[in-house]
Image (tube, rainbow, N blue to C red):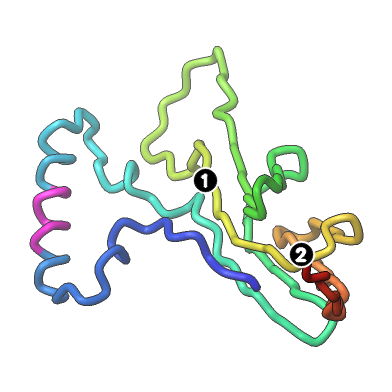
Amino acid sequence: MFGLTPYDKWQRGIERKRSDWDIERMFDNMLESFYNNTPFPNLLNSKEMNMKVDIKENDKEYTLEAEMPGAKKGEINLDLKDDILTISWERKNEVNEEKENYIRKERSYGSTSRSFYVDDVDIEKSTAKFEDGVLVVNLPKKEPSSPKNSTIKIQ
């Protein structure tokens, strides 16, 4: 079994009408811009740190591929707790003491994470590789256990 853990607040009610989402999003945007002191509010809502993930399955394993452009291997963490695999990525802002006159600064800093339910994988045989901005995680499936037959004595 492999599944996504819900994350996006806009996916919480599939039965909700699209217009409800639009109204809620409009109020969120209005409040964010009201309390936002930056002259470039669109940069705060950047999706640069979000990772896109593809999951493939065959008879033997699941393969998860996460796009993480600009990430460095040391910024990525893979954790498994209670059958939840979490990929997290944090990019820290490198502080430069020298003051520069930026006209526009679009590189993003911060953190993001994605979580997946993985109850039937052999975590001991799992592997991960990060190359060219793509994290590939191979999660072999556990061998199916054969049902055990037992007899219960009647007293």
Query: Which of marks 1 and 2 precedes in the sequence?
Result: 1
Name the kind of residue labelled 1 in the image: Thr
Name the kind of residue labelled 2 in the image: Val
Specify whether 120 is left or right of 18: right
Q: Secondary structure at mark 2?
A: strand
Q: Quadrant of the N terminus?
A: bottom right
Q: Secondary structure at mark 1?
A: strand
User: Residue tagged by mark 1?
Assistant: 112
Q: Is residue 75 above or below residue 25?
A: above
Please say whether residue 19 is one of the residues in the magenta stretch.
no
Specify whether 62 is left or right of 122: left
Which residue is pictured at 10% across the width and 46% down the height?
30
**Rendering coords of residue 117 (x, y %):** 60, 61
Which residue is pictured at 81% across the width and 76% down the height?
61
Specify whether 37 is left or right of 54: left
Extreme residue in the bottom direction: 59
**Rendering coords of residue 74 (x, y %):** 76, 38
**Rendering coords of residue 63 (x, y %):** 75, 73
Q: Quadrant of residue 121?
A: bottom right
**Rendering coords of residue 85 (x, y %):** 66, 54
Q: Nearer the viewer, residue 96 or 3?
A: 3
Extreme residue in the right direction: 125
Q: Nearer the viewer, residue 25 or 102?
A: 25
User: Residue tagged by mark 2?
Assistant: 136
Magenta segment, which residues?
A: 23-29
Extreme residue in the top direction: 97
Q: Nearer the viewer, residue 8 or 60?
A: 60
